[in-house]
C-alpha cells in the first residue's frame, strides 16, 4: 500500500482545523489519522489554523492544546491563514493575468433564484456575471462591491483518493475573493498546501466533494497535485454528524465525565483497530488496509452537561 515507510518522501501531511469552536472526537480522530498517515510515510506533519472567517474565528489556542493533549506533535510553528492574505491575492493576480477571473455582483438570493441548466449541480454558480458587458458591469459596480470568480474551463475534475479511488466531482466558477475582501477556503487551502510543501491531504470525508475544484485550481496555478485520503466521519447514534447537542464530545466535556485525554486517545485508537498507548506505539500497526471503511458511531457518555470552556 502507498502508506509504508518505504514510500518515504520529503513531503508533509497536515491537519487544518477552522478555529470556530472546540474540536470534538471526530475532529480529533481525523487529526490522529492525518498524523498516522504522515508519520507512516516518513512525511513531516504540519498544522494550519484556518482562521479566515473574521466573524467566527478564535485564536485556536484551545484546539492546539487539545491536539497536544491527545499526543500529537508537529514539525513547525502552525501557520495562520489570517496572516497570509498576500499569498492568496498573488494567486488571484496570476489567474487574472491568465484571463481566468471575472467580477461577480450577485447576492446569495440572486444566485439561488437564477435559472440554471437542468443538469447543473446543486449550488453551482449559474454564470450570471460571467459575460457581463462593460456597461452592465460599470452599472453594477456602483451598486455593490464585486466578488471575484474563477472563469472555470471545466465542469468536472477527477482526483484520486487512497480510500475512494477515482472521484469525479463538479467544478463551477468558484469564488476567489469574497466581496468583503476575504479570501475563501477553496483558494487558501490550495495556496497553503503548496506553500507549506504539503503533498498529502488527510481530512474528513465531507470534504471529498471539494477536492475536484481544489485540485483543478492547483493545476491552473501550476502547483503539484497532492495525495488525498478522505477518512470516514464520526457519527452520533442517530447516524448524523456529531454536533454540540450530542453532549460530551469535546475533550473538555469528556474530561468532566471522567475520561481524560489519554482515554479519549485510546478510544479513538480502538475505533481504528489500533492498540492503546502513545501514538508512536500505534504507528507500526497502522495500515491503510486495516482502516475501517465505515463511520465510527460515537455515543457521548452521560454526565455533566457540555461545558463550553
Ligand atoms: N478547515 C477545514 C475544516 O476544519 C478543513 C480544511 C481541509 O482539511 O482541507 O473543516
Image (tube, rainbow, N blue to C red):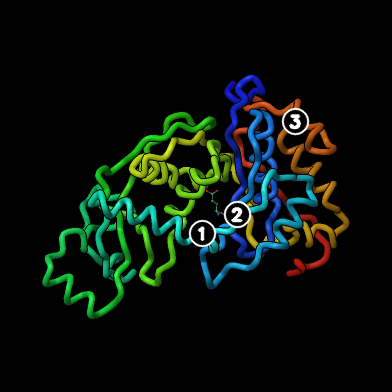
Relative horizontal placement of residue 17, taking residue 307 as reference (left or right): left
Pointer 3 or 1: first along the chain = 1
Q: Are marks 1 and 2 in contact (CB under 8 Å)?
A: yes
Q: Residue at x 58, y 67 (%)?
A: 57
Relative horizontal placement of residue 304, taking residue 218 as reference (left or right): right
Which residue is under mark 2? Answer: 79
Image coordinates of residue 73 in percent, x first then y, are 74, 45
Which residue is under mark 1? Answer: 84
The CA span between labels 3 and 1 is 33 Å
Relative horizontal placement of residue 242, taking residue 169 as reference (left or right): right
Q: How many marks?
A: 3
Say above or below: 230 vs 302.
above
Asked if ligand 1 lies within 8 A of label 3, the reply is no
Q: Residue at x 67, y 23 (%)?
A: 5
- Checking the image for residue 175, the label placed there is none
Q: Callout 2: 10 Å neighbours few (<14), some, many (20+)? A: some
Image coordinates of residue 240 in percent, x first then y, are 59, 53
Image coordinates of residue 266 in percent, x first then y, are 81, 41
| Quadrant assignment for the N terminus | top right
Pointer 3 or 2: first along the chain = 2
Q: Nearer the viewer, mark 3 or mark 2?
A: 2
Which residue is under mark 3? Answer: 283
Asked if ligand 1 lies within 8 A of label 1, the reply is no
Amino acid at each position: 500500500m502507498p502508506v509504508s515507510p518505504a514510500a518515504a518522501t520529503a513531503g508533509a501531511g497536515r491537519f487544518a482545523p477552522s478555529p470556530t469552536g472546540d474540536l470534538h472526537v471526530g475532529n480529533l480522530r481525523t487529526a490522529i489519522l492525518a498524523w498516522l498517515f504522515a508519520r507512516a510515510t516518513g512525511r513531516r506533519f504540519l498544522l494550519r489554523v484556518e482562521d479566515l472567517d473574521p466573524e467566527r474565528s478564535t485564536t485556536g489556542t484551545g484546539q492546539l492544546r487539545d491536539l497536544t493533549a491527545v499526543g500529537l506533535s508537529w514539525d513547525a510553528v502552525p501557520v495562520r491563514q489570517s496572516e497570509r492574505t498576500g499569498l492568496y491575492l498573488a494567486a488571484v493576480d496570476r489567474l487574472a493575468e491568465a484571463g481566468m477571473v471575472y467580477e461577480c455582483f450577485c447576492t446569495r438570493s440572486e444566485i439561488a433564484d437564477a435559472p440554471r441548466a437542468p443538469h447543473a449541480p446543486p449550488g453551482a454558480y449559474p454564470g450570471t456575471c460571467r459575460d457581463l458587458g462593460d456597461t452592465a458591469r460599470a452599472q453594477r459596480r456602483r451598486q455593490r462591491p464585486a466578488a471575484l470568480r474563477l472563469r472555470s474551463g471545466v465542469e468536472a475534475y477527477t482526483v484520486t483518493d487512497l480510500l475512494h479511488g477515482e472521484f469525479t466531482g463538479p467544478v463551477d466558477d468558484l469564488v476567489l475573493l469574497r466581496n468583503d475582501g476575504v479570501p475563501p477556503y477553496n483558494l487558501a487551502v490550495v495556496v497553503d498546501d503548496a506553500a507549506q510543501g504539503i503533498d498529502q491531504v488527510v481530512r474528513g470525508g465531507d470534504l471529498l466533494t471539494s477536492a475536484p475544484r481544489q485540485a483543478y485550481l492547483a493545476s491552473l496555478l501550476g502547483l503539484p497535485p497532492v495525495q488525498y485520503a478522505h477518512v470516514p466521519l464520526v457519527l452520533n447514534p442517530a447516524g448524523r454528524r456529531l454536533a454540540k447537542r450530542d453532549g460530551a464530545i469535546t475533550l473538555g466535556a469528556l474530561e468532566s465525565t471522567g475520561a481524560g485525554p489519554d482515554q479519549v486517545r485510546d478510544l479513538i485508537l480502538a475505533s481504528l483497530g489500533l492498540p492503546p498507548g502513545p501514538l508512536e506505539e500505534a504507528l507500526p500497526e497502522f495500515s491503510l488496509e486495516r482502516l475501517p471503511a465505515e463511520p465510527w458511531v460515537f455515543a457521548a457518555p452521560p454526565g455533566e452537561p457540555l461545558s463550553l470552556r
